[in-house]
Amino acid sequence: MVQPRVYFCLSAPKRARLLQFLLLFLLLLTPDGLKAQSDESYDDRRKLAFDFYTQNRFVDALPILEKLHAERPADIAVLEGLSFATLANAYTISDPAARQAERAKARKLAEEAKAAGDNTNMLKTLLEVPEDGSETAFSSNAAVQAVMQEGEAAFAKGDFAGAISAYNRALALDPNDYSAALFLGDVSFKQGDHAKAGEWFLRAIHIDPNRETAHRYWGDDLVAQGRMSEAKEKFINAIVAQPYLRISWMGLSQWAQKQKLTLGHPQINPPGKVEDKGKDDNGHSQTTITIDPTTMMNPNAKKDGSSAWFIYTLSKAVWHGERFQKEFPTEKEYRHSLAEEVDGLQMVVGQVKEGIKKKEIKQLDPALAALVKLSDEELLEPFVLISRADQGIAKDYPAYRDAHREKIRQYINEWIIHPAP
């Protein structure tokens, strides 16, 4: 995950408009407004949010938001905005302990907003800031880290020239600094230079294609240009890069809403389960198999193919035994693996096809029909990795991604995106 910072939930165009979308009534004052705030109503001051936010002057917004929150603590939009501005302000603080305290304060404000009923994407991302306010450094190189911190402080104040200068200096020190290239693309977008933004995002992707942020930022930049088909591909690439991060899905989800589409995983849920019960007194593994009675006792189980799920459960039992050790000799403990899951599902597909061939299956269960189709399209692995992954299976993802990116893209494009109901 990229360093939690001001941009943390704000993909490139969202720095220009996300508060308008999420905090429609957030107050941020212009300099003239600051002088007249005592004469303005609460609502009048809140309406000034948009002009102030487009200037990227989050630090200037902070004291105004604090005052508004004191006036109306129940205003969730202001509370969320205060959390965001506090997080932005943290990047202007040079002392590490004080900066961490400011980040912890931002997180606490986000928790208050959640308790008050807030549930926006922005809030969910703010809540990913660690409770203690700790942060991951942009770089292990102290010189690069210092310059990146300088750039972030400038960005939080709306000083784009200062931010660009700092990020460029960071790249001069380390041409492979992902964050510097990413942030230069972000600032370029903010300045309306889409061509330059795309160049910087592409450079960040070349530095590390397996980080989701540059893909997602580039997608948002393309959305702002109305290039929706190209944007979809970037958002899918973000998921391919890091599918197990919630934020990786945010771009495609918002894209789908704009296109009047929805996202959803195939509803294929194998019945039954297999559990390890430790070892007996002789050191032998004990495995408990629970079989769903509908796969055996339902009179229609053969007619719709659902009886085939029985072999899936048996397959898992074998993997809990010696099969895993044979396939993964370097791993000391059993884990659920991609190989195990695909093996079991493929055995079910074989049983179903045999039943169809023998004309025992009259009307195939929809979930099994989808499973057979996935198998025929050679998409069982992406299905398992994207739609059925647990901690064990996730360990197999990097190797598969490196060899089969296009298969994962195909699966997401053809099986996850659907017309809205």
Image (spheres, rainbow, N blue to C red):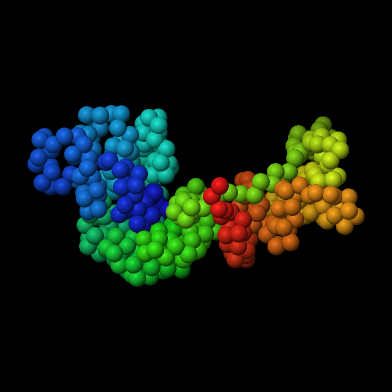
Q: Where does the image place residue 65, in percent across and percent down from the top left?
A: 23, 38
| The quarter of the displayed image where residue 71 is located | top left
Foreground pick, 237 / 358: 358
Foreground pick, 140 / 119: 119
**Residue 323 appearing in the image:** no
Outermost residue toward the right in this view:
358
Q: Residue drawn at (31%, 35%), measured in percent from left and top?
A: 79
| The quarter of the displayed image where residue 142 is located | bottom left
Q: Is residue 116 above or below residue 146?
A: above
**Residue 404 appearing in the image:** yes
- Residue 216 as seen in the image, left or right of residue 53: right
Q: Residue drawn at (58%, 49%), measured in percent from left and top?
A: 264
Q: Is residue 408 above or below residue 124?
A: below
- Residue 381 as seen in the image, left or right of residue 412: right
Foreground pick, 364 / 269: 364
Q: Residue drawn at (21%, 50%), measured in percent from left and top?
A: 51
- Residue 374 as seen in the image, left or right of residue 88: right
| The quarter of the displayed image where residue 163 is located | bottom left
Q: Where does the image place residue 302, in percent across and percent down from the top left?
A: 86, 45
Q: Residue drawn at (59%, 64%), measured in percent from left and top?
A: 405
Q: Where does the image place residue 289, in percent across and percent down from the top left?
A: 80, 37
- Residue 390 as seen in the image, left or right of residue 40: right
Foreground pick, 13 / 168: 13
